[in-house]
């Protein structure tokens, strides 16, 4: 059987297998070598964060039953997209597409911080009062839908092969759990790793309550983009043990830990300019 056809037919179990495998490894690592002490009940956060993951998974399957691989197969069958138009050899197209999609995710992430209406959705991810493996999949359903549509557009425009889509999604999900992990990595190892990939210590800076720190280190997988576009920040000012995770204005667990409050969070407060657009940092969130 053709490998691409096999992957297309078994996309869901492949992704789920890697998801649960990576989650189990990271959850065990957090128990054995935690980086920070948690401030909110782990059971409370996990129950609600994973409930949100289940809701998002069901929603995506209902709205987009063919998922991203179906879009890639459809585009390929009609010769749509740059790589299909120029008949780029599969050996080059797959790695190039994986890197290109990672750049799209980086740019999308910056956009969700820069546009106030999009930040209202994305702040669900940032409002988590602690930082661990479940934070990596904590996104509002509307943001998930918009992200899927952006991904579909990129796949069609680039002509991304089916194999590249599956590899990218498996790697992205695994890396999101890894770099959101509350895990301790030796500093010498972290310094080497972050020249290629986003490490937990690198991305944790992005979840600081301080505006200038939250608007840095946007990458989820490859760390190159932050260095290339000038959004890289090495360490939080307060250090990883003493930094505060979350958003200044949203510290009530009923609002940011329980699922009903999390789902309502984008619709709370008024729309104002977010920090990424300010010239003077005020150390607070006004969105």
Image (cartoon, rainbow, N blue to C red):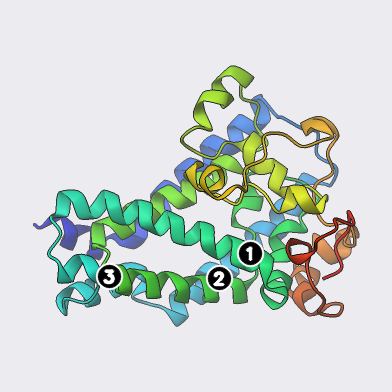
For the residues labelled 1 and 3, the Cα–Cα distance comes to 24 Å
Of the numbered discs 1 and 2, the one sitting upstream in the chain is 1
Residue at 80% x, 61% y: name it. 279
Q: Residue at the spot x=67%, y=64% of the render?
A: 113
- In the figure, is residue 1 to the left or right of 98? left
Mark number, residue 88: none
Is residue 131 among the parts visible in the rendering? yes
- Tag 1–tag 3 contact (CB < 8 Å): no
- The answer to whether 109 is drawn above or below residue 188 in the figure is below
- The residue indicated by pointer 1 is 139
10 Å crowding of disc 1: few (<14), some (14-19), many (20+): many
Query: CB of mark 3 within 8 Å of CB of mark 2?
Result: no
Comes first in the chain, label 3 or label 2: 3
Residue at numbered disc 2 = 144
Quadrant of res 42: top right
For label 2, the SS is helix
Secondary structure under tag 3 reads helix
For the residues bearing labels 1 and 2, Cβ distance under 8 angstroms: yes
At a point 73% along the width and 57% down the height, the residue shown is: 126
Which label number is shown at residue 72?
A: 3
Residue 90 as seen in the image, left or right of residue 174: left
Which quarter of the figure is the C terminus placed in?
bottom right
Which picture quadrant has residue 78? Answer: bottom left
**Label 1: element kind:** loop
**Horizontally, is 186 left or right of 8 in the view?**
right
Instruction: Choose mark 1 or mark 3, whichever is in front.
Output: 3
User: Viewer-proximal residue, 266 or 109?
Assistant: 109
Distance from the alpha carbon under mark 1 to that under mark 2: 7 Å
């Amino acid at each position: 059987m053709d490998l691409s056809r096999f992957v297309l037919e078994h996309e869901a179990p492949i992704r789920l297998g890697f998801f649960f495998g990576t989650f189990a490894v990271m959850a065990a690592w957090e128990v054995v070598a935690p980086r920070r002490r948690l401030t909110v009940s782990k059971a409370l956060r996990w129950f609600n964060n994973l409930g949100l993951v289940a809701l998002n998974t069901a929603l995506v399957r209902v709205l987009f039953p063919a998922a991203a691989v179906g879009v890639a197969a459809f585009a390929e069958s009609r010769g749509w997209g740059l790589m299909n138009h120029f008949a780029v050899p599969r050996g080059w197209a797959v790695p190039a597409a994986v890197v290109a999609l990672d750049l799209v995710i980086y740019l999308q992430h910056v956009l969700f911080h820069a546009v106030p209406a999009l930040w209202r959705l994305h702040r669900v991810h940032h409002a988590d009062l602690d930082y661990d493996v479940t934070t990596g999949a904590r996104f509002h359903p509307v943001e998930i839908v918009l992200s899927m549509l952006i991904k579909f557009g990129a796949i069609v425009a680039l002509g991304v092969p089916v194999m590249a889509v599956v590899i990218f999604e498996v790697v992205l999900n695994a890396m999101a759990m890894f770099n959101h992990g509350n895990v301790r990595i030796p500093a010498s190892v972290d310094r080497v790793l972050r020249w290629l990939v986003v490490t937990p210590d690198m991305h944790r800076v992005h979840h600081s309550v301080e505006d200038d720190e939250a608007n840095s280190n946007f990458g989820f997988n490859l760390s190159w983009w932050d260095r290339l576009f000038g959004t890289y920040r090495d360490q939080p000012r307060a250090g990883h043990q003493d930094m505060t995770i979350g958003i200044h204005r949203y510290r009530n667990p009923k609002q940011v830990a329980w699922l009903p409050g999390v789902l309502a969070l984008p619709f709370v407060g008024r729309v104002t300019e977010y920090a990424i657009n300010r010239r003077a940092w005020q150390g607070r969130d006004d969105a």
